[in-house]
Amino acid sequence: MEIINARCRKIKENDLKMIMDWRMLPEITKYLNTNPHLTMEGQYSWFQKIKAEEEKSIENGRKAFYWILEVDETPAGFVSLVNTDNTAKKIETGVYIAVKEKRSMRLAIDIQWNLYDYAFEVLNMHKVCEEVFEANSAVNRILDMCGSKREGVLRDHVCKEGQYYNVVVRGILKEEWMQKKKGLNYNIIEFE
């Protein structure tokens, strides 16, 4: 197994410009629901919401968790767990690796498996959900390998610049993950 030195740390104010630049990269926005035109003012507003969320516990209404992915102590991407539903015990993942030199199949799989661990073992969720553009075959293939099941397709669900895109709805249940992870060998990623 390839050893990867990675961790997910909390977002800091001095990360905002970097996140904004990443989020507007064409290869990143290509498979995201929007083509944003971000500003630093908007980034600061978003950061204040993140800080307010971090003060809450999951039991007290926390809806989102955001991290910077560091690989070899270098910021490389963005990781999130969002749209927490404490009644249904489900949460959605979000990941992008912005730094091309750090991208690898091993890293993508390790991130996903560690997100499952965090959601199921730390947050005690019942289900982890993902929504992925149908055209994003690489990520759909990775999620298949990670154990996420295709649950359906939302047809013409996202419109970007006049073009409609199908979105694959995916998910993995806690019991499925606990069964799948037996015998898996993967790098543990620390979440701050």
Image (cartoon, rainbow, N blue to C red):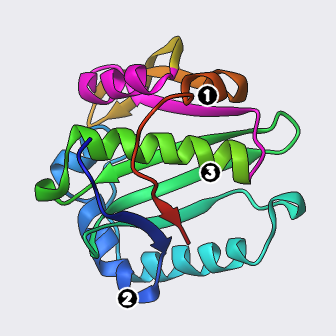
Quote the CA–CA distance across marks 1 and 3: 12 Å
Q: Which residue is mark 1?
A: 177
Residue placed most toward the observer, 85 or 126? 126
> Residue at the location (47% across, 73% down)?
9
Quote the CA–CA distance across marks 2 and 3: 25 Å
Residue 183 at x, y percent in the picture: 50, 28
Give residue 88's quadrant in the image: top right
Residue type for callout 2: Asn
Residue placed most toward the observer, 71 or 156? 71
Quote the CA–CA distance across marks 1 and 2: 35 Å
Cβ–Cβ under 8 Å for marks 1 and 3: no
Q: Is residue 48 above or below residue 164?
A: below
Residue placed most toward the observer, 98 or 73? 73
Q: Indicate which label's residue lies in the foreground, 1 or 2.
A: 1
Give residue 135's quadrant in the image: top left
Question: Could you tell me which secondary element the residue under label 1 belongs to?
Answer: helix
Q: Is residue 114 above or below residue 38?
A: above
Q: Is residue 182 above or below residue 75?
A: above
Q: Which residue is mark 2?
A: 14
Q: Indicate which label's residue lies in the foreground, 2 or 3.
A: 3
Residue 80 at x, y percent in the picture: 52, 55
**What segment is highlighted magenta in the picture?**
123-148
